Image: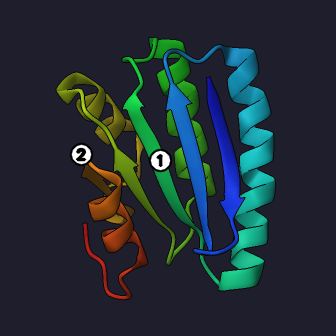
Amino acid sequence: MIDIEHDEALGILRCVSRGSTAAAELALFAQKAVMLQARARARHGRCLILVDASETAVHSQEIAAHFSTLAAAKSEPGDRSAIIIQSAIAKLQSQRMAPKDSTAYFTNEADALAWLLADSATP
């Protein structure tokens, strides 16, 4: 399961990933994500994404490739992603998929939000 919503109060996108993700589900997610990213950039000048992948398994190679393509194509200057992840193996996989200069990894939401919302955050 994967979903994404715009958190109006914080001005961020919240993505939740649980378990495995099918290719068809990822395609629907990608369409929604593109729309929400455009909205966030229009309102805030950048796109900040909090990803809760704390209960996500390692993805298949096919799904990981789709995530990599999506992440690379949709990242713009000023965008940042904070990823909450527990599994060391899933973190290694995610590090291969996400833009390195704008992504940081955390084990809890408080630290992830603090970094994401800081004006001068560096991963």
Q: Estimate the spatial distance between the alpha carbons at disc 1 and disc 2, rounded to whole Å.
A: 11 Å
Q: Against 33, is 2 above or below?
A: above
Q: Nearer the viewer, residue 41 or 61?
A: 41
Crowd tier of the residue under label 2, counting other residues whose Cα lies within 10 Å: few below 14, some 14–19, many 20 or above: some
Say whether residue 105 is left or right of residue 99. Answer: left
For label 1, the SS is strand
Q: Nearer the viewer, residue 119 or 73?
A: 119
Rendered residue at 53%/32% (across/down): 17
The N terminus, quarter of image: top right
Q: Nearer the viewer, residue 3 or 47?
A: 3
Q: Against 105, is 120 above or below?
A: below
Residue holding disc 2: 107
Q: Amino acid at mark 1?
A: Val
Q: Amino acid at mark 2?
A: Thr
Please state the horizontal and vertical placement of residue 121, each as a whole percent of the image.
Answer: 30, 78
Residue holding disc 1: 51
